[in-house]
Each structure stands twice: as C-alpha cells, then as structure tokens.
Image: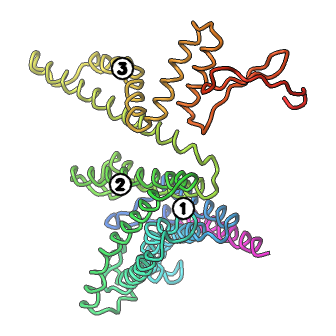
Amino acid sequence: MIARRAAWLAWSLAVLSVAIFLASILLLALVRTVRVPESWDVNTSLSLQVSVGALFLVFPLMGALIAARRPRNPVGWILLADGLLFTLSFMFDYYRIYGVVVPGSLPFPVVVAAINGFLWVPAVGLLGTFVFLLFPNGKLPTRRWRAVAWLSGVVIFLVSVSAALAPGPLQNLGGVQNPFGILQPWMTTVLWAILPLLPLCMLASVFSLVLRYRRSRGEERQQIKWIAFAAAVVGLLYLNAMIFAFVFPSGAWFQSGSPLWLDVIGYTALLSFTLVPIAVGFAVLKYRLYDIDVIINRALVYGSLTVTLALVYFGGVTLTQALLGTLTGQRELPQLAVVASTLVIAALFNPLRRRIQSFIDRRFYRSKYDARKTLEAFAARLRNETDLDDLSEDLVGVVRETIQPEYATLWLRDPDGMVTRDPESPTPHLRNEPEASR
C-alpha cells in the first residue's frame, strides 16, 4: 500500500511538472506577441526555449520513475523536487515579463519575479550536494557526513533567504524593485558572504562520492561510475563555456549582441545538466549497469579523436594560409586547401582511431587489453595446432589467464564416457557416467 501511494504521488508530481511546462509554452507565445525592451536582454526564440524546457523534463520524469520503484531512496524525490523547481522557474520567467509589459494582464507579476529570483538556489543546491551525498542507496557514506549534510541544508536556506529578501532592482525588469527587499545593507552583506560556502559544500559532496567509490565493490562501483561520468561531462562543458566567455569579450551567454556560437556553447553546457538524472536513473534502477564501461571507453576514444582531428585540421589550414600569404601575398585561403585538409582528415580517421583505442586500452583497461592480446595469440596458435593434449593445456591456460577463475577443468566427450583433462594432472581422468548425468 505504501509503495502504491508513493508511486501515485511521484507520478502526480511529474504530471504537474509537465502541466507547468505546457503553461510556460503558452506564456512564451504571449511574450512573443508584445514588445519587450531590448535592455531586458530576453531571448524569446520559441523553438530554442521550448527545446531547452522540454529536455529539463528529464528531471521530474526520471525522478518519478525512481521514486515509484525505489520509494525509500530520497534521490528520486530530490530529482522530482528539482524538476518542479526548474519548470516553475521556466514558467515564472515569462509570467513576470508578460505581466510587467502588459499591466493588469496577470496578477502579482513583480511578486512572481521576486520568487523566481531565488528558485535557482534550492534547485542547484539540492542537485549539487544531496544527490552526491546520498547516491546510490539513499544513505550517507558514514555518520561523520551528517555535519556536511546539515551544513549544506543551512547554507541553501540562508542563501535562498538572502536572494529573496535582498533590496534592489529585480533582474531584467527595467529597474523594478524587489517587493521583499527588507534586509538592511549589512545583513545582506553578511548573508551573501555565506554564498561561497555553497560551492564548498558541493565539492565536499563530490569528495564523499570519491571516498565511497574507493571503498565500493561490484554493482555499487558501477553505479558510481555512471554519475561520475555524467558529472565529468557537465564539468568539462561548463569549464569550456566559461573559458570561451572570458577569452572572447563579445558578450555573455544569451545576451543581446552575443554571437550565435557563444550561445550554442552556453546552451550545450546548460543542457548537460540533464545527463545527471539520466545517469542516476540507469544507476539506481540498475538498468544496463555494466554498459558504463563501454560508454566511458567510447567517450575517451572519440573525444580524443575529435580534439586531435580538429587540431590537425585547423593547424593545417592555418599553416597553409600562412605559407600562401608569404609566397603569393594572398590573404584568402583557396578552396583547394580546404578540400585537401578535409581529405587528410578523412585519411587519418581510421588509423588514428585505432592508435587512440590501443592507447586507451593499454592505459586504462590494461587487464582487458592483455586478455584480448592473449586470445588473439591463442587464435593464431589454434590454426596450426594439431596435438589435442597440447591444445587442451593451451586452452585451459588461456581461460585461466583471461577470465581468472578459481580453477579450470576441460571436459571432452567421447563415445565411451566423459574425459576430463586437468592441466595440473599428468594424465586425463576418465569418467563413465550415465547419459542423463552428462
């Protein structure tokens, strides 16, 4: 009965998130019908915003799936809460814009804008701290981590209060003041001084997952690999986006005047957050759990291959342009040079992929690499081997070296009975048994 109620509640919250998202689309369509001041820096691209919001529905849907099947694991409920917060923020963003631009069209738009100003704190805080602290079984690694959990909760609460009650203009509303801004300046300074504790709590939570991984074995280790892979991808994409934003001072992400390629990098980093609930779902539900090793291997190989080919391509194009500029004085790169660089990349793809795959296997998957080499060598000997005794000993030796079982015995069937060949015994053992027992 409790499991049924939990499943009903989980899917009801997921349906509520979807309903809020659909309402957000309606509000976004209304915003596109009015004139929004350019100084508000509001991106009203319907297709782009809808696609981003739709992808973030992964949080409530995956959270509902986990909470319905594992109701005692708080990770699923945290994902559900994050999904509700993200969809509410998405809806409130356009609610406040339309309500302020068209006075009287919607009730309390400034209040909604003030609430939307701090929703990001619990959303990001819950995802960055408690998901890592409680993953994968919903329990802290040890009792000593209770202090970190309590500190994370207090910091999230205080930062939310400081963001909600800080006086001053609301973001992108043309100077409209925060109606809840009742804090004194010194109180605001003290509360915002707590903000650096939030990323520190996130780092401590990630460190707890590292310690849990070092002590884990079997399925738990595979589960941690899933979320570690997702977190690594999110971190790399965000680091890449921040580097581009600082190196190229042409405008921040999603702001008016910013180049399209910078917005694409920013949206890619933002959407990478959806990898976390997907990885958590695979890990907690233990669906295709061991496929993570293949995913990590392919990500390392093709990620390295993409970076290498990009460096070769742009390096070749730059070098060709410099040589042509020196010899002929032409600044424009001929089309023939671009075609030649593309053909070089196509020719290098397979050889370079094989070399990178071999290096990754040797460096990170040494045991599997040695096993593969052993099997390849045995297959080569098998084509030329005719002696059954030598072949039996080689086969058992290969099995022991690659699979590493506790013991290995080879059984051969002949018309008179069962013949077992133990490589530790000088002679085979004959076992005459009834047909039903063979």
Is residue 191 shown to the viewer in this render?
yes
Left/right placement of residue 23 relative to residue 89 reads: right
Q: How is the image coloured?
A: rainbow
The three-letter code of the residue at mark 2 reads Tyr
Residue behind mark 3: 348
- The CA distance from mark 2 to mark 3 is 30 Å
Q: Nearer the viewer, mark 1 or mark 3?
A: 3
Residue 17 covered by magenta stretch: yes
> What label sits on residue 29 in the rendered view?
1
Residue 379 in which image quadrant: top right
Is residue 100 shown to the viewer in this render?
no
Q: Residue sitting at 24 percent across and 52 percent down?
A: 250
> Marks 2 and 3: CB-CB under 8 Å?
no
Q: Earlier in the sequence, mark 1 or mark 2?
A: 1
Q: Residues within 10 Å of mark 1 (few under 14, many from 20)?
A: some
Q: Residue sitting at 36 percent across and 50 percent down?
A: 236
Q: Residues within 10 Å of mark 2 (few under 14, many from 20)?
A: many
Instruction: Read off the magenta span.
Output: 1-27
> What label sits on residue 238 in the rendered view?
2
Residue 32 image position (x, y, % from top left): 49, 61
220 w.r.t. 260: above or below? below
The three-letter code of the residue at mark 3 reads Leu
Q: Nearer the viewer, mark 1 or mark 2?
A: 2
Looking at the rendered image, the quarter that the N terminus falls into is bottom right
Left/right placement of residue 318 relative to residue 289 reads: left
